[in-house]
Amino acid sequence: MRERNTIQRRLVLNALNQFKGHATADEIYHIVSREHPNISRGTVYRNLQRLCDMGEIRKVEVPSGADCYDHMLTAHYHVRCEQCGRVFDVDMAYMPELECSIRDRQGFVLTGHSIMFSGICPECQKKQDTE
């Protein structure tokens, strides 16, 4: 059965694609609701999940923060700013061989990994310099 491409799903995907960086569900909702005030938060959240299920976007789990969404589907790493909380892509090659080098004593069969670096983004650094 072919999946319908609803107007709401297209609005959510367009909002994510125009966002600089990685948007949270709330940020995407605010972008969409500016032009379409009748859309509900639940509709945006459901469509984000559906887009993830369809493999059109990826959810990035953020430790101690709100999960965000990424339109880049290839495996890559992220960095989270300790000041503003925004998430950015890291410019380095993904290392699939990393899993092979890990010895697991609990009996896990490793199927993947995600690494979240932390730091201070250039915009927050500028704010610190002017204070």
Image (tube, helix red, strand yellow):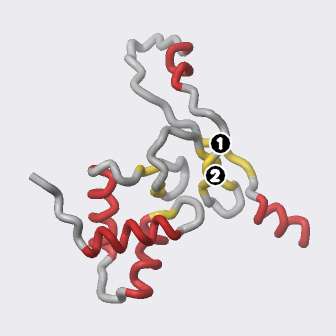
Name the residue beneath numbered marker 1.
117
Quarter of the image that includes the C terminus? bottom right
Q: Residue at x 36, y 88 (%)?
A: 37
Report the residue that reaches farthest toward the right: 130
Report the residue that reaches farthest toward the left: 1
The first of marks 1 and 2 along the sequence is: 2
- Residue 24 against residue 111 in the figure, above or below: below
**20 horizontally vs 43: left or right:** right
**4 horizontally vs 130: left or right:** left
Tell me how far mark 1 sits from mark 2, CA to CA. Answer: 6 Å
Residue 16 or 118: which is nearer the viewer?
A: 16
**18 horizontally vs 126: left or right:** left
Whole-percent x, y for residue 12 in the image = 37, 70
Q: Residue at x 42, y 14 (%)?
A: 106
Residue 70 shows which numbered tag? Answer: none
Whole-percent x, y for residue 125 in the image = 82, 61
Q: Amino acid at mark 2?
A: Arg
Q: Amino acid at mark 1?
A: Phe
In what element is the residue under mark 2?
Answer: strand
Residue 67 seen: no
- Residue 77 against residue 89 in the figure, above or below: above
Residue 107 seen: yes
Residue 53 or 102: which is nearer the viewer?
A: 53
Name the residue beneath numbered marker 2.
80
Q: Residue at x 32, y 66 (%)?
A: 45
